[in-house]
Amino acid sequence: MRYISFYVHVFFLFFHIQSVTGYQNKEQQSKEDSYQFLADKFYANEKDSVTAAIYGNQYLLKAKIDKDTIKIANGYYFLASSVKSSIAHKYCDSIIAITKNRNTSSYPAFAYLNKADNYFNEGNYKKAFDYFLKVHEEATKYENVMLQYLSKKNIGILKAILGENETALLTLTECYTFYSKHKNQAPYDYLNTLFALSESYNFNKKLDSATLINRLGYKESMKLKHEKFKYYFVLNEGINQYCKKNYVAARDSLRRSIEELKVNGDRANLGQAYFYLGKTLSSLSFEGDAIEQHKKVDTIFQEIPQIIPESRENYEVLINYYKDIDDKNNQLKYIERLLKVDSVLNINYKYLLKNIVQKYDTPRLLSKKQEIINSLESEKKLSSIMIVSLLMLSIVSVVFWIFNYQKRKKYKKRFDELYNADFANKNENTKSPSIKEADSITISEEIVSEILRDLKKFEQNKDYLQSNITVNDLAKKMNTNSKYLSTIVNYYKKKTFSTYINELRIDYCIEKLKTDTKFIKFTVRAIAREIGFNSPESFSKSFYKLKGIYPSYFIKELEKLNKI
């Protein structure tokens, strides 16, 4: 997922500053006119950061003299918008410090927004995500709809970066619906949403939908007089055509976008364009030209902080190329670069990394790095190193195979037991201690009998399928107290209340999976929700704890039997 750095937050602040001039006396109006003059000068010189900073400092100085907290915050914000991100963070922290006890619809929301934008451009996506969430919370609190969708859009982009492609598509589609109604007021955000949406369609393998959005974005860029933006849709369509295996069309689109990206200085997207041009040329059998494009990607990502998941594949291509031609020095150089990329990805992409197939995972890279260094130092040591490495790899492979074989055997045995068990009649057939034997629990026989009778009804009616059941809630429904109910479940069911409920649910689930052909087609998430669990994680953990295998394994084995 790529991103185009934005300054829309300054646009919003501009209108905020204009809106505060209103019903004031002449002296106050004169002061506001002076503030407005400095604000106008700041915006007029925004592209000249040095000049803009002069007016921002004058604004801040005047605000401090007048001891006007909101105006001081405005001044800090002007300066934060005209300096490097490291200094901008300090100005934003000052805004947050002085406005934290007097929240307004603008502050500290705009300070959070500036920090989120800067963290993104620094490549720190995790912190960027945190601050976009803060912006959204502030915007929701004050019903600032435009700011809500600005933050929601960027959260959608970050979701895609973290590999949450399906939820990202939902978020960006919602933002598109909103911005399409406000495209004249916020053309940049509308076009940026289209750009992100087309890529999200691509990630979700909806390539025709991506093409439709790219065509729309191209036309809207010209209609809204943001013609330079159209090349971003040319870039996305080039990537889309590559995914469709239309390599000639992909090559032409990518080359067009590269010419514009060279001019506008967008290095991150230029790197992405070179990356896909390299893959396209390789598919067209122009291997030499393809490697040159991948080397350009490396050059760019040595200069900018953003690291994207595709960077990893780019280095794998270069490593394999130099491995094939036995150029150990370059192979070692790009392994070093890939290790650096992995360290950044490990910080920013904890959720994403689990979905990336790592042909050169970090342990193997470190091992290979040492092997190559030793090879360069002394070719004579190569044979012994290779023999030891192969021996170790063989041992590890055998151990791993044995472990997996035992694990599969154990799982298969547990599946057979569960498949042949009759959970539907399990509770009726389970023998409980007689009521007279229960002297140790110090509850009268009458109460015990009544609670056991209610529990039987509870099981027969399958009330345990309701979510969020607690011992307190169930005790109230049975007109008893939670201590009695918990004690009786512990004694007669031989388990805790939580385990009792979970086991009922899972036994029901197993029988339903065995007998209901529709139910077996549900996702694990849907099954968990259907039988009362709040999340697929808690369902899977309980299933494994009680039955010794995971529900996903049980379902796969059932599907195999059904096919037979």
Image (cartoon, rainbow, N blue to C red):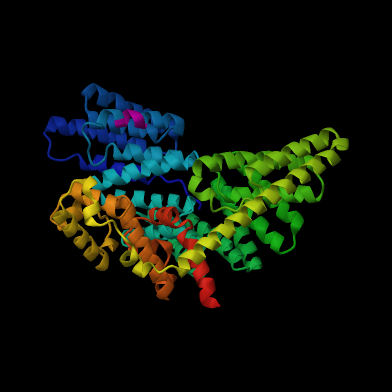
Asked whether residue 316 is in view, the answer is yes
Which image quadrant for residue 91?
top left
* Residue drawn at 38 percent across, 41 percent down: 130
Vertical position of residue 443 compared to residue 104: above or below = below
**Residue 224 % position (x, y):** 40, 59
Asked where in the image residue 247 lies, by quadrant, the reply is: bottom right
* Left or right for 406, reference 437: right
Q: Locate residue 206 relative to residue 255 in the image: left or right.
A: left
Quadrant holding the C terminus: bottom right
As displayed, is residue 226 above or below residue 350? below
Residue that lies at the very extreme toward the right in this rendered image: 380
- Any part of residue 59 in sight: no
Please report the bounds of the magenta region as a residue range. 92-96
Query: Residue 254 appears at what percent x and percent y?
Result: 61, 59
Reply yes or no: does residue 94 show up in magenta.
yes
Q: Nearer the viewer, residue 8 or 113?
A: 113
Asked whether 470 falls inside the magenta stretch, the response is: no
Decide which of 102, 438 is in the foreground and name it: 438
Where residue 163 appears, as percent x and y from the top left, is 49, 53
Q: Nearer the viewer, residue 257 or 282?
A: 282
The number of callouts visible is 0
